[in-house]
Amino acid sequence: MTQTEPAKTAQDAAEPSTCIICRGTNFRFAGTSHGYRIFRCEGCGFHFVHPTPPLDEIAAIYEKYSSNTLYSAKADRKVQRAMKQIKRYRRLAKGPRFIDFGCNIGTAVEAAHRLGFEAYGVDIDEESVGIARKQYPSGRYHAGPVESLPEDWKDFDFAFMIEVIEHLPDPHAYFEAMRGRLKPGALLYLTTPDAGHWRVPRDFTAWKEVFPPQHLHYFTRKAMRRFLTDHGFEVIRFIWSPKSRLKVLARKL
């Protein structure tokens, strides 16, 4: 890892032109990690891998490093943790329909079900959804992109998105599809690594959350507020965390 920009290849010769969050044009090279170049937008602090890796390259990495075994081993603990989070904010939800975007093996879906919600979960990984259906059959699950959700999966009152947005090749497209499934006034609880946290080292690529191509985008609070506002959400509050975690509660306008 280095702060000195490496020699460019034909693949990475193009520099970033416009920040996908604030549309700024002033960037700083932040370093390389696992062969991927990372830049920082000087306008909003958003960090990102550039160029974005091809989708087949990203998919191959996920197939190689599946974490289902690890998640299954911690499943009971994760259900209890999700129940605490849902209890904390459910009074702000305006109805009983809950959905977890990026549900993995279904622990948050199960937590919501135990708390009386109509609980749904979607994940791109078929293996994870298969485990969820077997382990937590009270929920409803869908394997595939959010754009492929069944027609009746809509009008949700409360949405979770836990450690998902940093993985998305196109977060704007995902949010547009996701937003269309939520009721006006729906509550969104989102977490992602916090690129503006005081624990992030001066050498950005030394941060433990920097491991492309699994993580492609790194938000600051400023960048997240701009992103959510642009997608029709009002930030209720950012939730302080001692860890380098950005936690935000927002509502669909």
Image: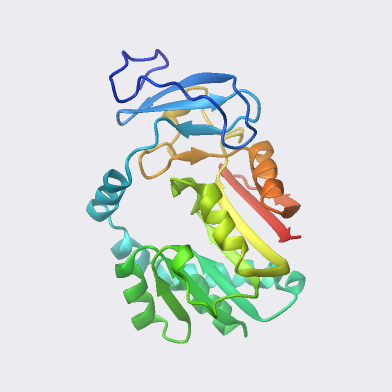
- Residue sitting at 53 percent across and 58 percent down? 162
Indicate how the structure is coloured in the image: rainbow
**Quick check: 203 above or below 66?**
above
Q: Position of residue 100 (x, y in %)?
A: 53, 68
**Quick check: 202 above or below 176?**
above
Tell me the quarter of the picture where residue 156 sits: bottom right
- Residue sitting at 52 percent across and 22 percent down? 202
Q: Position of residue 20 (x, y in %)?
A: 56, 36
Q: Tell me the quadrant of the picture where the N terminus can be found.
A: top left
Nearer to us in this view, 6 or 163 = 6
**Quick check: 6 above or below 73?**
above
Q: Tell me the quadrant of the picture where the C terminus can be found.
A: bottom right
- Residue sitting at 33 percent across and 15 percent down? 6
Can you name the residue that lies furthest to the front here? 151
Q: Position of residue 178 (x, y in %)?
A: 57, 62
* 187 sits left or right of 124 in the view: right
- Residue sitting at 28 percent across and 57 percent down? 66
Q: Position of residue 188 (x, y in %)?
A: 65, 62
Number of marks present in the image shown? 0
Nearer to us in this view, 217 or 111 = 217
* 13 sits left or right of 89 in the view: left
Tell me the quarter of the picture where residue 51 sits: top left
